[in-house]
Image (tube, helix red, strand yellow):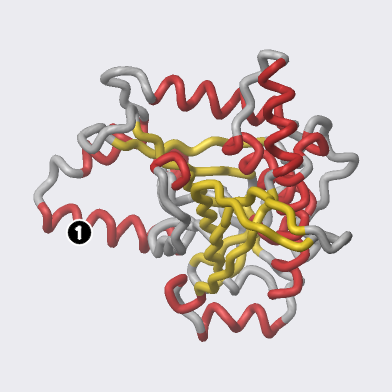
Amino acid sequence: MKKTRRRFGDRYDGRLLRKVDPFYKIIPYIMKTRVDSQIFFDDKIILEKTEKYIQEKRAQNINIGFLHVVIAAMVRTMALKPRLNRFVSGRKIYARNGIYVSLAVKRDMSEDSPETTIKLEFEPTDTLFEVMEKIDKAISENKQANATNDTDKTAKLIMMCPGFLVRFLVGFLTWLDHRGKMPKVLNRVSPFHTSVFITDLGSVGIQPVYHHIYEFGTTSIFVAFGIKNKERIIDRNHNIVEQKYVNVKVVVDERICDGYYYAKAFRIFRRLVENPHLLEVAPEKVVEDNEI
């Protein structure tokens, strides 16, 4: 991300929006919580080109998966549509200082297997292959037997305290976070302080769900996708054909940008997932948030 000089009112993890329309400035005072401002929508991604691309790359011993494509597409979308990478804290709207993706990882597919959460930082210029490398490295490290990451260690340390102290700590940290004063080390390990949370429910064999965005932290977007489906449609030549698709369900904080901007951004996201070859090269230009 482009480094900018920190000004009064900025946080270490975000820059205060100063040029945003007054109507948007007042919205966080009306819709005070993310629960109050969540909106839900779903989309359908056609897999014909995506699956063909993945098969071609695997034939070249490049082990790309659908999760890689989804995350790379989201990183690219935020590079082109930076208002998606905003968050609300302490009744103010900020532009985040980096692109972060959080996701849950099970160490193996069994009911008793522990689950951990990882947070990855990406550059807006990252290509699909760079995204794949970062994801695979993090997942490999966290799937090792007895592996513990900083998030797990922090949670374990906090839960060594009695319940009343845990409630106090979480409340105190939330109070600090609303003022941009939460310790940086906790922000770094917290999966709830992220640009987007992504979950692959197809890996456990179910359809996607609408997942809430958390009150603790600064997550503004949650994306869930599920198992692959087939349907029969009538094509342009009036023939009945079968196509494969995957459902995607998204929950967003409507306070960070308007519906028109969301619609344009997620059309870009869908186009990138359906045409992953577009992610092989860095974007020609990274768009900066122009309301800071």
* Residue 53 coordinates in the image, percent (x, y): 74, 31
Pinpoint residue 22: horizontal percent, then vertical percent: 70, 83
- Check the image and report above or below for 55 versus 83: above
Image quarter of residue 39: bottom right
Q: Nearer the viewer, residue 230 or 114?
A: 230
Residue 140's x, y, as percent? 45, 21
Quadrant including the C terminus: bottom right
| Count of numbered circles on the image | 1
Looking at the picture, which amino acid does disc 1 mark? Arg
Name the residue beneath numbered marker 1: 167
Quarter of the picture holding the N terminus? top right
Query: Which residue is the extreme one toward the front?
Result: 239
Q: Residue at x 69, y 66 (%)?
A: 17
Q: Position of residue 18 (x, y in %)?
A: 72, 69
Q: Is residue 89 left or right of residue 214?
A: right
Asked whether, in this view, residue 263 is left or right of residue 139, the answer is: right
Q: Nearer the viewer, residue 228 or 282?
A: 228
Name the residue: 71% across, 51% down.
78
Residue 104, quarter of the rendered image:
top left
Could you tell me which residue is drawn at 40 percent across and 64 percent down?
215
Q: Secondary structure at mark 1?
A: helix
Residue 15 shows in this picture: no
Residue 154 appearing in the image: yes
Q: Is residue 292 left or right of residue 99?
A: right
Q: Residues within 10 Å of mark 1 (few under 14, many from 20)?
A: few
Asked if residue 43 is positioned above or below residue 242 in the image, the reply reads below
Is 159 situated above or below 20?
above
- Which is nearer the eye, 13 or 215? 215
